Image (spheres, rainbow, N blue to C red):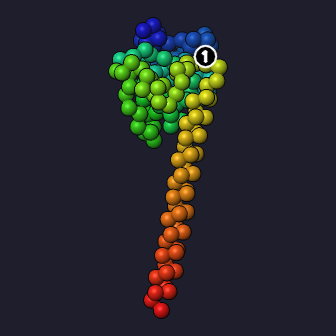
């Protein structure tokens, strides 16, 4: 791919032409270029884009804000490299097809999407729903446990 070849040189120019940097400074988690050219594999630059290699599928770019956000956006899971979320590699299955059919719409990895938060709000709703269910189970268990203790105290008198 042409983007990978762009970074093969020993001295690399920022795509906006503002300055140059060496390969050692590529993905060093420090934003050297204003346009984020030097950090395609990290979320160091706020205006930068993260490069998903997606081996076995089509490479794509994500906004840096979507890196390590606990949502698997790259089909190879490379955007969640901190390790708080384990992302299965679905690239071999043809990209994000598994996630698109179960959790997301087809615009989940499209940078030109009109509503990039649509998939996150659906996931947020599911998370809140699960949290509510867990809370209700805890309340019911606590109530039943207190009733059981009261009846046990009455029976022991």
Residue that sits furthest to the right in the current view: 114
Q: Is residue 147 left or right of residue 88?
A: right
Q: In this view, does 21 lie above or below 135?
A: above
Q: Which residue is drawn at 34% across and 21% down?
A: 92
Residue carrying label 1: 112
Q: Residue at x 48, y 20 (%)?
A: 51
Residue 137 position in % (x across, y down)? 51, 58
In this view of the protein, which residue sits in the foreground, 84 or 123?
A: 123
Give the residue drawn at x 44%, y 39%: 85
Q: In which quarter of the image is residue 91?
A: top left
Instruction: Give 47 or 63, whichever is nearer the viewer.
Output: 63
> For the point 41% across and 37% down, which residue is it?
86
Q: Residue 114 appears at what percent x and percent y?
A: 65, 19
- Is residue 87 something one can see in this rendering? yes
Quarter of the image that includes the N terminus: top left
Dot 1: element? loop
Q: Is residue 138 above or below residue 37?
A: below
Q: Residue furthest top?
A: 2
């Amino acid at each position: 791919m042409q983007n990978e070849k762009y970074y093969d040189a020993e001295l690399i120019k920022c795509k906006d032409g503002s300055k140059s940097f060496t390969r050692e400074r590529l993905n060093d988690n420090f934003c050297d270029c204003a346009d984020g050219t030097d950090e395609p594999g990290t979320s160091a630059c706020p205006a930068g884009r993260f490069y998903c290699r997606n081996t076995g599928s089509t490479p794509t770019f994500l906004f840096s804000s979507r890196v390590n956000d606990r949502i698997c956006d790259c089909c190879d899971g490379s955007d969640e490299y901190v390790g708080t979320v384990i992302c299965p590699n679905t690239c071999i299955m043809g990209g994000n097809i598994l996630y698109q059919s179960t959790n997301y719409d087809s615009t989940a990895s499209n940078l030109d999407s009109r509503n990039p938060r649509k998939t996150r709000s659906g996931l947020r709703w599911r998370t809140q729903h699960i949290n509510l269910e867990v809370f209700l189970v805890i309340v019911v268990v606590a109530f039943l446990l207190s009733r059981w203790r009261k009846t046990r105290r009455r029976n022991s008198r």
